[in-house]
Image (spheres, rainbow, N blue to C red):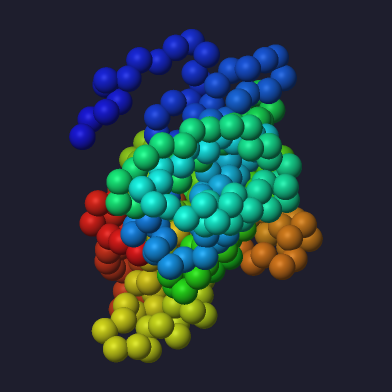
Amino acid sequence: MAIRPLLTSQPHVVVGLGDDCAVLKAGPDFDLLLKTDAVVEGIHFLPETDPERVGHKALARPLSDIAAMGGTPTSAVVTLGLPPGFDPERVLALYRGMNRLAVQHQVAVVGGETTTNPGQWLVSVTVVGSIPRGQALLRSGAQVGDAIFVSGELGGSLAGHHLDFEPRLAEGRWLRSCGWAHSLMDISDGLAGDLPHLLAASGGLGAELLGSAIPVSRVARVRALEPKAKPALLAALTDGEDFELLWTCAPKDAVRLLDGWKSAFPTVPIHCIGRVTEQPGVRIRDSRGIQQLPARGYEHFSAHV
């Protein structure tokens, strides 16, 4: 669907549709970041999921998008859709989980809306953040020859990571302040789904990845041993909801970035997984040679928890 032609921009919009957050002019020294995200029962969590973990996830998702711009979140509003006969204690638990994360990152939950939603829970959270004027890191800055980095590990999110992940806010701000990152986004739909978005936003570039360098999580490796399970590398590429950071930088800055990151975040590994190419498309180099990216990432309207 072509939604963009139906939307009218205004002079105060720096970045609209197409990046992790909207960027809006707010004053001489800073811009506003705006992001909304939703979790739906049966899609993003199950009816028996601990509601405190649901609350954590509902807020952590838009916070991850603020991190992907290099920004600082400040406040949030919550829209809660509830079916008839809902359990009030479950609502309170959801807000406890949300508030715990909000306190950790000094985010004020300042209001919202509650409405009826027949059949299932829906939690939508809109977050406002700030960033120094003109310094938002966008998807569109990748350059030919750039090194491609990811933080953490990928794959196996359904084992619990998708409910308990910590948004990489400090790490995103560090990438912005160091000045070495050309482009940045978070991984929500899997590396196979999100890297092509970054490359498309950067002018239709491509990438070559080194299969052995992609950080496959231990959970994904263990799950790959189960009958009919995805191979571990495929899980790392397509499971989605990793909420790690994905960015590019010039090769000449890669070593300095690695050293600086290790000093700033010794418990969070990062990995150089490939390079940006002029030729469109994403290819993976492994023991068999160079293969096309074997699968797409998580696709909304076709996959469920």
Asked which quadrant contains residue 304, the reply is: bottom left
Q: Nearer the viewer, residue 303 or 92?
A: 92
Q: Nearer the viewer, residue 158 or 139?
A: 158
Asked which quadrant contains residue 73, the reply is: top right
- In this view, 64 is above or below 138: below
Q: Residue at x 52, y 52 (%)?
A: 88
Q: Position of residue 287 (x, y in %)?
A: 36, 80
Q: Position of residue 288 (x, y in %)?
A: 31, 78
Q: Residue at x 48, y 25 (%)?
A: 15
Q: Residue at x 68, y 40 (%)?
A: 107
- In this view, 4 is above or below 185: above
Q: Residue at x 46, y 37 (%)?
A: 114
For the question of whether residue 38 can be seen, the reply is no
- Looking at the image, which residue sits at the far right? 263
Q: Position of residue 275 (x, y in %)?
A: 46, 56
Q: Is residue 145 left or right of residue 28?
A: left
Total numbered circles? 0
- Looking at the image, which residue sits at the far top? 11
Q: Is residue 203 left or right of residue 6?
A: right
Q: Nearer the viewer, residue 38 or 247?
A: 38
Q: Quadrant of the N terminus?
A: top left
Q: Quadrant of the C terminus?
A: bottom left
- Looking at the image, which residue sits at the far left? 1
For the question of whether residue 263 can be seen, the reply is yes
- In this view, 83 is above or below 243: above
Q: Position of residue 244 (x, y in %)?
A: 54, 57
- Looking at the image, which residue sits at the far front? 85
